Amino acid sequence: MTDLELTQLTRRLAKQFFNQAYPYEARFNRRLRTTGGRYFLGDHHIEINPLMLSEFDEETLVGVIKHELVHYWLHVHHEKPDHRNPHFKELLQRTGGLRYAPVTSKRRTTTSGRLVYQCKKCGQLYHRQRRINVRRYVCGRCGGRLGLKH
């Protein structure tokens, strides 16, 4: 699917489910990793993660587009286009959009960081993505010295 076909699909869904024209652009953005799509408040365009189409079916893609169109519809009608808004939740349910995007293969699968520090006194583990100064920081449980676990 090309960006032009995505824009046409988005316009068709906006007319069908929101009874409103969507004169803006929709395009794929392969840099998106943890989200299905984004709606931009400034120029109203929508970006979609291409993995929503390649790893899942077209129904998932349509659900993500509907989600972004709910953001658009609320913003145009001068309401808060955020996920906590009760109007957002109600409109999303009424149109059949996805509340959450499915997990893709590009999303990080580990919740712990790459570095593991261990207390030399009590053995408590600390997972971090960035290095920490072991001379400055101590264990939060017992106050012992930390060391990089190999």
Image (cartoon, helix red, strand yellow):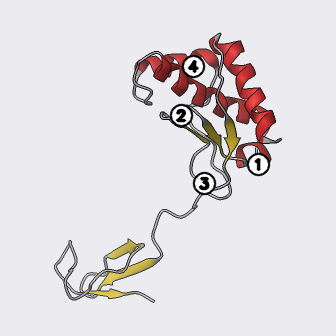
Quote the CA–CA distance across marks 3 and 4. Answer: 25 Å
Of circles 2 and 1, the one toward us is 2
Q: Quadrant of the N terminus?
A: top right
Quote the CA–CA distance across marks 1 and 3. Answer: 13 Å
Of circles 1 and 3, the one toward us is 3
Element type where label 3 sits in the image: loop
Q: Amino acid at mark 2?
A: Asp
- Measuring from the top left, give residue 108's x and y in whole percent: 57, 61
- Which residue is under mark 2? 43
Where residue 109 sits, quadrant-wise, is bottom right
Along the polypeptide, which appears first: circle 1 or circle 3?
Answer: 3
Along the polypeptide, which appears first: circle 3 or circle 2?
Answer: 3
Mark 3–mark 4 CB contact (< 8 Å): no
Where residue 25 sits, quadrant-wise, is top right
Along the polypeptide, which appears first: circle 2 or circle 1?
Answer: 2
Residue at left 57%, top 51%? Answer: 34
Q: Alpha-carbon neighbours of circle 4 within 10 Å: few (<14), some, or many (≥20)?
A: few
Q: Is residue 16 above or below residue 39?
A: above
Q: Is residue 133 above or below residue 59?
A: below
Where residue 128 sits, quadrant-wise, is bottom left
Q: Amino acid at mark 3?
A: Arg
Along the polypeptide, which appears first: circle 3 or circle 4?
Answer: 3
Q: Quadrant of the C terminus?
A: bottom left
- Which residue is under mark 3? 33
Residue at left 64%, top 43%? Answer: 102
Q: Which mark is residue 55?
A: 1
- Which residue is under mark 4? 93
Front position in the image: 103 or 47:
47
Q: Amino acid at mark 1?
A: Glu
